[in-house]
């Protein structure tokens, strides 16, 4: 495990509005490898969001949000000196999507960090499901920043030129990406994800990993769904207490000695009812952390499928080579074990001449040699894929365990804070009741 | 002295002599006099008074089920400890069922019409909806019966009522004959609902009536809010339980994260338990007391109506007498004076009971509401403790990992 060195090399992955202890924990736990990660040299922030209107591809007016990406050299500023002004550019969500698709295709063996959700899902009823809602936009801003930091701290992805240009080149970037021709490979990627082919000798490790990613997807979905329902109900419980505030106030009007106590207690009930809004808003952050790993599960599955495709194609090539070799053998020895059209036609229309046979044999020899070359290449490709993929999977596993544990701890902290608030309010109310 | 006379008079109205006319302790007598002189500054808290000078202690406990061929019912043990001379023995122990308490209440209402009789818990419960023999129901009912009896025993006038004595001491209450008749008498009084034409109801009694109406309304609202909260909490609990199981199920597919996830699942389960306790506490301790006060208000209103009735009677007779006097110059008849006395006694008793009731109410609600606050605080404390111990567990693991890494 690499030692995390000085502060400047480390990135704060999540929302910067966190306590110093949490920040410290993040610094300690964020796995930024020493090496050529972009983050070492560059500070990246997504700082603002703005609404724009413009004409889209079908020449219709649309409203969309753009996000401001700020980058700045990560060199420490000398004491008393002013920090350098950052370079900035604006990007919209669809450009992030384009970047991610490019990465998916270019690095099929890497678990590509996910983007924040396109539409608000697992919403509890008081939350808005509207994409233009300021809270949603804010959470998306944080999610986009998180995405960039994840990519920038990845040992492989951070070196990508297109990614660098995404951060630095506002206007020309789209053309450059499309010029790489990655879109041709998109089709094959789609094929790998949806095709129903069967691999003869599946790699057990990948099968287990795919199974795990399916389970993770399923369990996190369920967790998010139930959490939203829990939030909904808890909101109801707190808000009804607000009614106590009103009735205590009305009641206090007809009381003499009890009046003051009741009135003040009523105010505390109002405070209690209002406190749930902040509590649940904070919990959304936890939900976002879970969502990131929900989408990560999808990315893991995608790597498994790509491997399956490579494995399948390798098996096809090997199969093809075996059949060619058999044909060659038959032709050389004269025995027919494998059906071939040439053999049949020669039976039907008479034996071919020695010349014909020899040219056919030569062609098969050539084909076989080529086949063997292809097989060797494919084999190497597959092995390379497996090697690099497992390296990244190992890295991912550690990151996941760390991040999720951190998320659970911060969730527990949130719960404790909620309990403390509850105790405070009810203790205050109790004091008022005692004065009745 | 005038007030002592008044008690005797009040007793004679239904023919049953009230045995004693003097309240046991001089301090409560002083209290009565003080109340008539100065209603405003009630510094002394009659509730605390009674506690200091109490010489009659009653308790209702030990519920037992009785099964006979005709019916099944519950009896409660009623224990008495007293130093009063009106009782032959210093201690008594009898068993009573709800019917017996009902009998006592009716007897008290009829023999002490000028006084506020504490309410009993609801008589009828819908079969099929509520289980009359469930532990919770019996426990709640028993506490209410205990409260009823204690309130009667603490009352400076009611506690000397011979029916109470009978109730506390006699082994077998032979009450069947009188019961039906008496309940009819009780009903007829209740039926007259505010149909009295009064010349001038004294402002204080009007104010009492208004207060009771508003208070009744507010209590009703509080009861509805409390029930709504219970319902919301119950629905929250259902979701929370499922939430906890998802964490445990997730733990099954992880290795490093297994213990943290199980830990979270465990915390959620603990919180579910704490929430359940809160809900039970609210249903058993808080809601019944609220409902009891609604009944108390009804009793008080009925006493106010009786007072109005006696005032109307007096005014009626006075009017008739004045007319006769104008006609033939006969002096004011004695019955009219007696009626006037009766009204004044009633007013005095009522005011005294009102002050006592107000004081008890203040005490009871203070207790009720602080109790409610305590239950909520307790609930949060349990949850907080669970989450805090989880954090310790998780953070220990973290430092454990870190030290093993750097080694």
Image (cartoon, coloured by chain):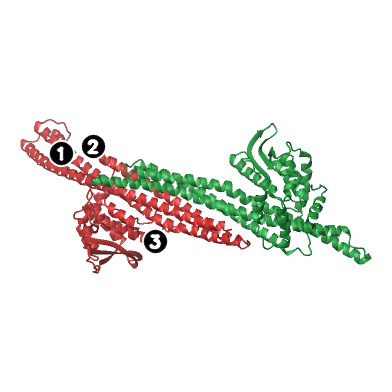
Closest to the observer: B324 or A294? B324
The chain holding disc 3 is A
Q: Label 3: which residue?
A: A135
Q: Residue at x 35, y 58 (%)?
A: A19
Chain letter matching colour green = B
Same subunit, tags 2 and 1: yes
Where is residue A94 drawn, in percent x and y?
A: 30, 60
SS at circle 1: helix
**Residue labelled with disc 1:** A321
Mark 2 lies on a secondary structure that is loop
Residue at the right extreme, as displayed: B328
Q: Quadrant of residue A63?
A: bottom left
- For disc 2, the chain is A
User: What is the distance, in whole Å, between disc 2 and disc 3 at their CAs?
Assistant: 49 Å
Mark 2 and mark 1: Cα distance apart in space:
17 Å
CA–CA distance in space, label 1 to label 3: 59 Å
Residue B92, located in which quarter of the rendered image? top right
Marks 2 and 3: which is nearer the front? 3
Residue sitting nearer the eye, B360 or A69: B360
Which of the chains bears the disc numbered 1?
A
Residue A167 x %, y %: 24, 62
Q: Residues within 10 Å of mark 1 (few under 14, many from 20)?
A: many
Q: Which chain is red?
A: A
* Sequence-wise first label, 2 or 3: 3
First-in-chain label (1 vs 3):
3
What residue did someone put label 2 on?
A201
């Amino acid at each position: 495990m690499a030692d995390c060195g000085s502060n400047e090399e480390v990135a704060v992955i999540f929302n910067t509005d966190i306590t110093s202890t949490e920040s410290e924990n993040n610094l300690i736990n964020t796995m930024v490898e020493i090496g050529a990660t972009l983050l070492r040299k560059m500070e990246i922030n997504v700082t603002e969001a703005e609404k724009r209107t413009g004409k889209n591809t079908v020449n219709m007016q649309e409203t969309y949000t753009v996000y401001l990406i700020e980058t700045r050299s990560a060199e420490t500023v000398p004491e008393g000196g002013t920090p350098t002004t950052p370079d900035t550019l604006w990007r919209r969500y669809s450009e992030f999507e384009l970047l991610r698709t490019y990465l998916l295709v270019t690095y099929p063996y890497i678990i590509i960090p996910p983007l924040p959700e396109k539409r608000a899902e697992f919403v509890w009823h008081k939350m808005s499901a509207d994409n233009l809602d300021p809270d949603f936009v804010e959470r998306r801003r944080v999610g986009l920043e998180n995405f960039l930091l994840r990519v920038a701290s990845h040992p492989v992805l951070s070196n990508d030129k297109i990614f660098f240009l995404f951060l630095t080149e506002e206007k020309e970037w789209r053309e450059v990406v499309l010029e790489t021709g990655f879109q041709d490979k998109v089709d094959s990627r789609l094929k790998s994800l949806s095709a129903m082919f069967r691999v003869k000798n599946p790699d057990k490790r990948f099968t287990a990993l795919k199974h795990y990613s399916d389970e993770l997807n399923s369990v996190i979905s369920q967790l998010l769904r139930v959490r939203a329902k829990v939030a909904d109900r808890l909101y109801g419980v707190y808000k009804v207490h607000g009614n106590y505030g009103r009735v205590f106030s009305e009641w206090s009007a007809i009381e003499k000695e009890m009046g003051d106590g009741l009135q003040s207690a009523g105010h505390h009930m109002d405070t209690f009812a209002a406190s749930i809004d902040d509590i649940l808003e904070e919990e959304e952050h936890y939900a976002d952390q879970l969502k990131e790993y929900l989408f990560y599960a999808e990315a893991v599955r995608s790597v498994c499928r790509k491997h399956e495709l490579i494995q399948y194609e390798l098996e096809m090539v090997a199969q093809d080579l075996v059949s060619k070799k058999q044909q060659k053998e038959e032709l050389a020895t004269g025995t027919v074990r494998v059906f071939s059209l040439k053999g049949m036609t020669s039976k039907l229309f008479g034996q071919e001449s020695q010349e014909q046979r020899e040219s056919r044999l030569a062609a098969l020899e050539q084909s076989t040699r080529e086949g063997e070359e292809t097989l060797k290449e494919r084999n190497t490709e597959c092995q390379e894929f497996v090697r690099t993929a497992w390296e990244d999977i190992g890295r991912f596993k550690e990151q996941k365990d760390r991040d999720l544990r951190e998320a659970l701890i911060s969730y527990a902290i949130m719960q404790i804070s909620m309990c403390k608030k509850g105790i405070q309010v009810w203790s205050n109310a109790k004091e008022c009741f005692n004065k009745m | 002295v005038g007030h002592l006379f008044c008690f005797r008079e009040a007793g004679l109205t239904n023919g049953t002599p009230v045995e004693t006319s003097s309240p046991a302790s001089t301090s409560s007598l002083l209290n009565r006099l003080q109340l008539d002189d100065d209603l405003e500054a009630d510094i002394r808290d009659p509730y605390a008074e009674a506690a200091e000078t109490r010489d009659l202690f009653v308790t209702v406990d030990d519920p037992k089920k009785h099964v006979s061929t005709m019916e099944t019912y519950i009896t409660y043990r009623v224990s008495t400890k007293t130093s009063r001379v009106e009782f032959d023995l210093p201690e008594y122990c009898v068993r009573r069922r709800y019917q017996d308490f009902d009998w006592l209440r009716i007897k008290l209402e009829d023999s002490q019409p000028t006084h506020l009789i504490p309410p009993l818990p609801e008589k009828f419960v819908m079969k099929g909806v509520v289980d009359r023999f469930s532990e919770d129901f019996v426990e709640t009912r028993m506490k209410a019966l205990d409260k009823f009896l204690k309130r009667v025993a603490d009352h400076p006038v009611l506690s000397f009522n011979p029916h109470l004595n009978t109730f506390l001491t006699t082994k077998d209450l032979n009450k069947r004959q009188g019961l039906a008749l008496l309940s009819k008498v009780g009903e007829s009084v209740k039926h007259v609902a505010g149909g009295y034409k009064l010349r001038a109801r004294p402002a204080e009694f009007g104010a009492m009536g208004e207060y009771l109406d508003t208070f009744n309304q507010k209590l009703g609202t509080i009861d509805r809010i409390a029930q709504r909260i219970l319902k919301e909490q119950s629905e929250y609990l259902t979701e929370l339980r499922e939430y906890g199981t998802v964490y445990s199920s997730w733990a099954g597919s992880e290795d490093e994260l297994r213990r943290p996830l199980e830990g979270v699942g465990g915390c959620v389960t603990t919180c579910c338990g704490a929430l359940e306790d809160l809900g039970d506490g609210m249903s058993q301790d808080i809601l019944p007391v609220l409902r009891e006060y609604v009944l108390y208000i009804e009793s008080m209103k009925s006493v106010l109506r009786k007072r109005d009735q006696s005032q109307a009677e007096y005014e009626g007779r006075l009017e008739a007498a004045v007319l006769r006097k104008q006609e033939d110059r006969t002096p004011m008849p004695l019955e009219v004076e007696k009626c006037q006395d009766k009204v004044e006694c009633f007013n005095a008793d009522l005011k005294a009971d009102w002050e006592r009731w107000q004081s008890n109410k203040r005490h009871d609600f203070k207790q009720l509401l602080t109790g409610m606050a305590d239950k909520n605080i307790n609930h949060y404390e349990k949850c907080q403790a669970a989450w805090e111990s989880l954090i310790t567990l998780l953070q220990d693991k973290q430092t454990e990992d870190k030290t093993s890494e750097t080694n």
